[in-house]
Amino acid sequence: LSADQIASAGGVSQREAQREFQSLVGARPMEYLTNYRLFMASQQLKQTDASIGEVAHACGFSSQSYFTKRFRERYGHTPSEHRAIG
């Protein structure tokens, strides 16, 4: 889903769509999407035995290293540590 698609669906400019989204949700669209994907990954790490790479890919991250970097920024620990914490 792109910013252009969101704007087009709402019949507004891309900038206006981003402004409205941020005012309603409290985050930029891509920031919200990334946080949602990280949340879903955190759930998969707790509930499945899938590898870190499989979880990263299933949640839309094309690189396991980028996924691990963003996961650490969001949660303060690595995906492996998150799984161990339970």
Image (cartoon, rainbow, N blue to C red):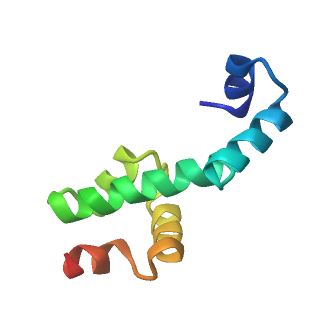
Toward the front, the furthest residue is 24
Q: Residue at x 62, y 54 (%)?
A: 31
Whether residue 1 sits left or right of residue 7 in the image: it is: left
Residue nearest the viewer, comparing 85 with 68: 85
Q: Quadrant of residue 82?
A: bottom left
Instruction: Tell me what residue is drawn at x 30 percent, y 52 percent.
Output: 54
Residue 2, image x and y in percent?
66, 31
Q: Is residue 14 left or right of residue 24?
A: right
Q: Position of residue 48 (x, y in %)?
A: 16, 57
Where does the N terminus fall, quadrant-wise?
top right
Q: Is residue 38 above or below residue 17?
A: below
What residue do we see at 20% from left, 80% from top?
84
Residue 38's quadrant in the figure? bottom left
Q: Residue at x 48, y 66 (%)?
A: 65
**Residue 79 or residue 74, whichever sits in front:** 74
Quarter of the rendering occupied by the C terminus: bottom left
> Is 42 rendered above or below residue 75?
above
> Vertically, is 83 above or below 44?
below
Quarter of the rendering containing residue 7: top right
Q: Is residue 60 left or right of residue 24?
A: left
How many marks on residues? 0
Q: Does 18 sit above or below residue 77?
A: above
Q: Residue 14: x, y in percent? A: 81, 32
